[in-house]
Image (tube, coloured by chain):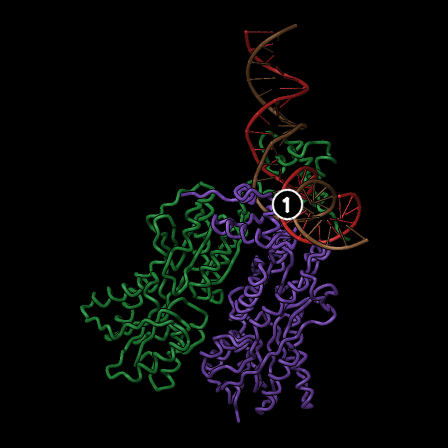
Chain colours: A purple, B green, C red, D brown
DNA sequence: CAAGTTAATGCAATCGGTTACAATACAAGA
DNA sequence: TCTTGTATTGTAACCGATTGCATTAACTTG
């Protein structure tokens, strides 16, 4: 039952050729006669030959493996990103080593270390919630291993980045709420060290300023965007004297929970408070009223990031690291925010 | 900047020892003097030595990499399973090669092939929706590479399996609906080739039979459990003459959408129709009324599956393949089904 | 026909650990 | 003192693919 693994030496012996010729033929080397190539390819297929990647990697010092570190896998967005990455990586013969940091810098460091020891050819990262330091990526930079950030990026002169225009998305969402007559909009965001949250806040501020409305800092909340946070926000609103008439929470699940609690407390959505979320997560469609949100092009982001990475590895594309690649996002208007 | 990679030969030369001694010391071989080990370990740490896994794998014919194939990553359940697997794998120094079949047998085959060519030491699989054949796993079995199924399992004498007791879960959910006074329960399930769905159906039938109620086959629907399916089911119910008073849909998102559409059509939940979902997905908590569902112990399942796999690889645990490992699930009762 | 090209293939070293089989040193036992 | 045993370290042959540098045969050209 247990079949023996067949090597280029076996093929060479059977075909009365040298291992070198077999190796070159299998790699489509131009110096090898076309007929010989066919012969070797056929025999290889017949005997179920598969290249020993370890021997190959040992010799070439390339692993054909790329590391991916994400905060969590369990979001619709992330798994879509990964599907996009996987498609491209597969096409180019790369494997993916995927791990989650679970939003902890410590785990992110550990993951990075594992990736480094696995000698990935490149690293794609969406950084954790509380990551402050870049130092665990320095080892890669020092060894000339490309690091590319996506979505949650870090600013580094030698690293590429793929993002959506969070500032614009934040602006659009806020503008829409203003457009629906909201004048006192609360903005619930995440850790402002992360570009995605900081940028959305900027967009929020720009939209407010655009209407010459005052910016009330008490209406800007930095939370962990968890389900508990959603509940806490609703409680807090209920306790406020001057209540907001609009709510822009940059996470759908958090927004959905918050909306649910507000409804239980008797607030009418969207009439008392109009709500906008972020990500176009499936929950945004099952809550009632359905949640206005921002569509995040995950699949596209994954494909773009991977294409960029592989382009850089192959040296075909020289990456301009000065500016991140920016993808289009889109405001999806649903009933949670339509007041007119 | 670009640092040179250090090898055991470098260490050997610096310490005036042989590469063999260095290798053995680093692997904690008993024949090596304790002091020598310390000496070598210190020097290795000082110079930032990292073992070249390819050389090692080439020689030992082990990759320390395990393949994981899942239908999709984007469910709370799956990513929790993976977190559990990752934790255990990390502890034992294994890497994970993760890929999604996107519910397609074809893609599952492709993934399996990639895993095979990457020479994973073992494979953990939750099979796709439409997988019929086992043949793409035969290559692993033939080469004595252990294959372990989890959640969506295939019956094979040489493969282990980790599951929840789907029959019991289906029974409990149905029993609960009956207990709430439902007498005409509709069961919406997935592809009955999959154990998870077939078993839940069995539990459903057992509960119905337990009350001496008739089994109406028109009330058993096999769907793809998608969001669209959820909508279609609601339409179908609305068109029925004898409408069900209970609804057991084995997927939370599908159930949530169905409930939403039913509500729009004027049905009172749970009074007209009581609803139970499956998986304890976050959506089950944000819909109103909150959805009764079955808790799925994902983290536990991941840990158990990985522990079993690694135990088998190390030969420490001899696996009993005749019976799958069964984990406890739990019915979580929420307002969508409480009528009394 | 000799010299120079071109095309196709082979030789052998290399990548960096691992490990079977010595080899060495020193202490205990005869 | 000589033998045997034990503890430690060394030698060298792998693992399988890659590739710089020949080598050989066949073909052109002056």
Q: Nearer the viewer, residue C8 or B169?
A: C8
Percent position (x, y) of residue B292?
Answer: 37, 71
Q: In percent of the image, x 24 and y 64: which residue is there?
A: B206
On the image, which quarter does residue A286 sit in?
A: bottom left
Label 1 marks a residue whose chain is: B
Count of numbered labels shown in the rendering: 1
Q: In percent of the image, x 45 and y 41: which residue is there?
A: B315
Percent position (x, y) of residue B128?
Answer: 41, 63
Q: Is residue A181 visible?
A: yes
Q: Quadrant of the C terminus of chain B?
A: bottom left
- Furthest residue in direction bottom, as rendered: A340
Q: Kindly state the secondary structure of the residue where label 1 is placed.
A: loop
Examine the rendered structure and indicate whether residue A221 appears above or below residue A61.
Answer: below
The crowd level at tag 1 (other Cα within 10 Å; few <14, some 14-19, many 20+) is: some
Q: Nearer the viewer, residue C26 or B150?
A: B150
On the image, which quarter does residue C18 sit in?
A: top right
Q: In percent of the image, x 54 and y 54: which residue is there?
A: A38
Percent position (x, y) of residue A295?
Answer: 55, 78
Q: Is residue A235 visible?
A: no
Q: Which residue is mark 1?
A: B52
Examine the rendered structure and indicate whether residue A291 appears above or below residue B323.
Answer: below
Percent position (x, y) of residue B67?
Answer: 49, 54
Q: In percent of the image, x 58 and y 76: which residue is there?
A: A250
Q: Nearer the viewer, residue A223 or A334?
A: A334
């Amino acid at each position: 039952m247990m079949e023996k693994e067949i090597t280029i030496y076996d093929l060479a012996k059977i075909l009365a050729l040298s291992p070198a010729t077999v190796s070159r033929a299998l790699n489509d080397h131009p110096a090898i006669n076309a007929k010989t190539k066919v012969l070797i390819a056929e025999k290889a297929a017949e005997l179920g030959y598969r290249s020993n990647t370890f021997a190959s990697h040992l010799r070439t010092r390339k692993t054909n493996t790329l590391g991916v570190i994400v905060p969590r896998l369990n979001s619709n967005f992330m798994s879509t990103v990964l599907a996009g990455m996987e498609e491209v990586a597969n096409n180019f013969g790369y494997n993916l080593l995927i791990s989650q940091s679970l939003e902890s810098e410590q785990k992110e460091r550990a993951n990075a270390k594992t990736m480094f020891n696995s000698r990935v050819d490149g690293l794609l990262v969406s950084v954790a919630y509380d990551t402050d330091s870049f130092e665990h990526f320095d080892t890669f930079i020092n060894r000339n291993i490309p690091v590319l950030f996506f979505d949650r990026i870090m600013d580094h002169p030698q690293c590429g980045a793929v993002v959506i225009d969070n500032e614009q998305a934040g602006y659009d969402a806020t503008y829409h709420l203003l457009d629906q007559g909201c004048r006192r909009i609360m903005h619930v965001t995440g850790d402002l060290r992360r570009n995605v949250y900081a940028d959305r806040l900027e967009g929020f501020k720009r939209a407010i300023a655009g209407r010459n409305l005052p910016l009330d800092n008490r209406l800007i909340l930095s939370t962990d965007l968890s389900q508990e946070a959603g509940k806490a926000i609703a409680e807090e609103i209920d306790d406020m004297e001057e209540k907001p008439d609009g709510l822009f929470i940059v996470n759908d699940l958090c927004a959905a929970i918050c909306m649910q609690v507000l409804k239980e407390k008797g607030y009418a959505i969207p009439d008392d408070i109009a709500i906008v979320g972020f990500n176009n997560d499936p929950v945004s469609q099952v809550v009632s009223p359905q949640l206005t949100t921002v569509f995040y092009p995950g699949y596209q982001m994954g494909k773009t990031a991977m294409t960029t990475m592989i382009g850089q590895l192959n040296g075909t594309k020289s990456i301009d690291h000065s500016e991140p690649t920016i993808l289009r996002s889109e405001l999806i208007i649903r009933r949670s925010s339509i007041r007119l």
